Amino acid sequence: MSKKAYDKIMAGLEDALAYAKGDAGRGIAHVVRVPVADVKAARRKLGMTQVIFARSFGVSVDTVRNWEQGRRCPEGPARVLLAVIERNPNAVLEAVGALAAH
């Protein structure tokens, strides 16, 4: 690695550390806010049982039940997936090859 590349990487790391310590002038945070999905409403809108919903979108039935009953809250990629399912379920079904099976 060249000295120039090393210096740029170190400068970026120092900026990230400074930002993490509260120095907002040394970095930019990009925050994506994904809404919490109403899993039961999304599933019912599609006319799917919990079992079919779980199979169609690649999650376990227990996970769907836990989300619907409020024992667990979807996080990270699951929240993104559920947001897309709420807005455009056919896009997800088509992407995973489940559209014909539904």
Image (spheres, helix red, strand yellow):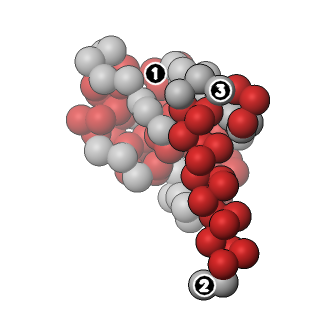
Q: Where residue 79 sits in the image (x, y, percent)? A: 52, 34
Q: Is residue 99 left or right of residue 68?
A: right
Q: Where residue 69 sits in the image (x, y, percent)? A: 31, 16
Along the line of sight, the residue nearer the viewer: 34 or 2: 2
On the image, which quarter does residue 73 sit in?
A: top left
Mark closer to the chain start, 2 or 3: 2
Residue at image mark 1: 40
Q: Real-space Cα distance between discs 2 and 3?
A: 29 Å
**Which dot, 1 or 3, sits closer to the camera?**
3
Task: Indicate whether 91 appears above or below 7.
Answer: above
Dot 2 surroundings within 10 Å: few (below 14), some, or many (20 or more)?
few
Whether residues under marks 2 and 3 lie with C-beta atoms below 8 angstroms apart, the answer is no
Q: Does the rendering let one see residue 44?
A: no
Dot 1 surroundings within 10 Å: few (below 14), some, or many (20 or more)?
some
Residue type highlighted by circle 1: Lys
- In this view, which residue lies farthest toward the top? 70
Residue type highlighted by circle 3: Asp
Task: Indicate whether 32 appears above or below 36.
Answer: below
Residue type highlighted by circle 2: Met
Residue at image mark 3: 23
Give residue 1's mark: 2
Dot 3 surroundings within 10 Å: few (below 14), some, or many (20 or more)?
few
On the image, which quarter does residue 81 sit in?
A: top right
Label 2 SS: loop
Whether residues under marks 1 and 2 lie with C-beta atoms below 8 angstroms apart, the answer is no
